[in-house]
Structures are given as structure tokens and as C-alpha cells.
């Protein structure tokens, strides 16, 4: 009987390890036909590992404050990633993009329907530090903890020094 339990426990541990490795692996699928799987730095056609972590941190903060997690919308994540890449590539750090304008204007340009939107941006060593800075800032925390938003997009792009630009877009 002890051997049977040990075998089941070993099998459970192996299954758990496989699931964790799968969850941590970057997705290499393509969001559109002909698109490269990797588009530089941490960005991929789907949520990168960094973006998954940023989304988890965002929702962990919401749960800590007794709020429901937000749905991470893949298209909204793609738009947030484009904003992060825009800041990196055009060397600016601002809510108003010289390329796309405000978050609402950007969503309209990309044909994303929304009744209201807000944006948080951060530039830090990693997504952990970026989220800690955002939740510590009253204005950014207000966006993170708003009950008025139902979905979010997170986008990450790394600069040449490995620092990340993190964009969070909130919509209803």
C-alpha cells in the first residue's frame, strides 16, 4: 500500500511540474498568419511570460483588495504591447503618444470598442517593481482597483538595458 501511495505522489508531482513548466513557457503561436513568433525582446504574438506575470500581479492586487480579477483581453494586450514598444522605440515616457495620441484615441485607431478607458504606464527594472510602483501611486492604484473596468490589457517591451516598459489599459 505504501508503494502505491508513493507512486501516486510521484506521478502527481511530475504532473504538477509539467503543468508549471508549460504555464511558464512563452507561447510561440502567431496571432495572425505570417506574423513572426518572436518580435524582439520579451514580446511575442501572444502574451509573453513577462506579460502573464504582469497580468497575474495586477489581478493579485485586485484580489488583495477584495475585487474580482479583470479579464485579460488578448486584443487589448496586443494594443498595450504596441504602446510599450512605441515608448521604447520613440524614446519617450508619457500617456500621450506622439504616434497614437491618448489611450482612447489609440483604441479607436485600432478599432477596439470601449465605453471608457484608462492607462497606467511604468518603466522599471522588471514587472514586479513596475507593479509595486503602480499600486503605490494613488492615481494608478485608482485605475487598478476601479470596479468600473471589466477587462484589461497588459503589454511589456524591454529596452536595450533590460528595463521594461509596462502598459496597462483598462476598459469597460
Image (cartoon, helix red, strand yellow):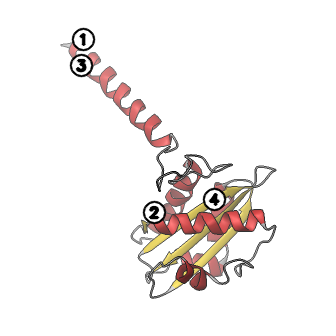
The local crowd at label 1, few if under 14, some if 14 to 19, many if 20 or more residues have their Cα within 10 Å, is few
User: Which residue occupies the foreground of this view, 123 or 144?
Assistant: 123
The local crowd at label 2, few if under 14, some if 14 to 19, many if 20 or more residues have their Cα within 10 Å, is some
Residues at marks 3 and 1, CA–CA distance in whole angstroms? 6 Å
Residues at marks 2 and 3, CA–CA distance in whole angstroms? 41 Å
Up-down relation of residue 73 to residue 12 (above or below): below
Residues at marks 4 and 2, CA–CA distance in whole angstroms? 13 Å
Q: In which quarter of the image is residue 1?
A: top left
Q: Which residue is denoted by mark 4 in the rendering?
A: 156
Is residue 132 something that shows in the picture? Answer: no
Q: Quadrant of residue 107?
A: bottom right
Q: Residue 5 carries which label?
A: 3
Looking at the picture, how far across and down is residue 145, in whole percent?
51, 76
Looking at the picture, how far across and down is residue 34, in whole percent?
51, 51
Sequence-wise, the earlier of marks 2 and 3 is 3
Q: Nearer the viewer, mark 2 or mark 1?
A: 2
User: Which residue occupies the foreground of this view, 33 or 139?
Assistant: 33
Sequence-wise, the earlier of marks 1 and 4 is 1
Q: In the displayed structure, does residue 168 sit left or right of residue 98?
A: left
Mark 2 residue element: helix
Amino acid at each position: 500500500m505504501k508503494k502505491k501511495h508513493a507512486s501516486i505522489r510521484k506521478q502527481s508531482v511530475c504532473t504538477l511540474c509539467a503543468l508549471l513548466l508549460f504555464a511558464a513557457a512563452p507561447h510561440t503561436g502567431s496571432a495572425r498568419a505570417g506574423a513572426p513568433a518572436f518580435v524582439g525582446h520579451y514580446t511575442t504574438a501572444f502574451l509573453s511570460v513577462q506579460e502573464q506575470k504582469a497580468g497575474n500581479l495586477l489581478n493579485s492586487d485586485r484580489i488583495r483588495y477584495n475585487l474580482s480579477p479583470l479579464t485579460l483581453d488578448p486584443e487589448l494586450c496586443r494594443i498595450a504591447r504596441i504602446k510599450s514598444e512605441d515608448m521604447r522605440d520613440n524614446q519617450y515616457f508619457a500617456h500621450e503618444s506622439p504616434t497614437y495620441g491618448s489611450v482612447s484615441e489609440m483604441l479607436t485607431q485600432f478599432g477596439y470598442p470601449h465605453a471608457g478607458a484608462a492607462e497606467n504606464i511604468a518603466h522599471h527594472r522588471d514587472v514586479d517593481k513596475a507593479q509595486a510602483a503602480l499600486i503605490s501611486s494613488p492615481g494608478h492604484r485608482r485605475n487598478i482597483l476601479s470596479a468600473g473596468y471589466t477587462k484589461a490589457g497588459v503589454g511589456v517591451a524591454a529596452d536595450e538595458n533590460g528595463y521594461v516598459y509596462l502598459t496597462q489599459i483598462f476598459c469597460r
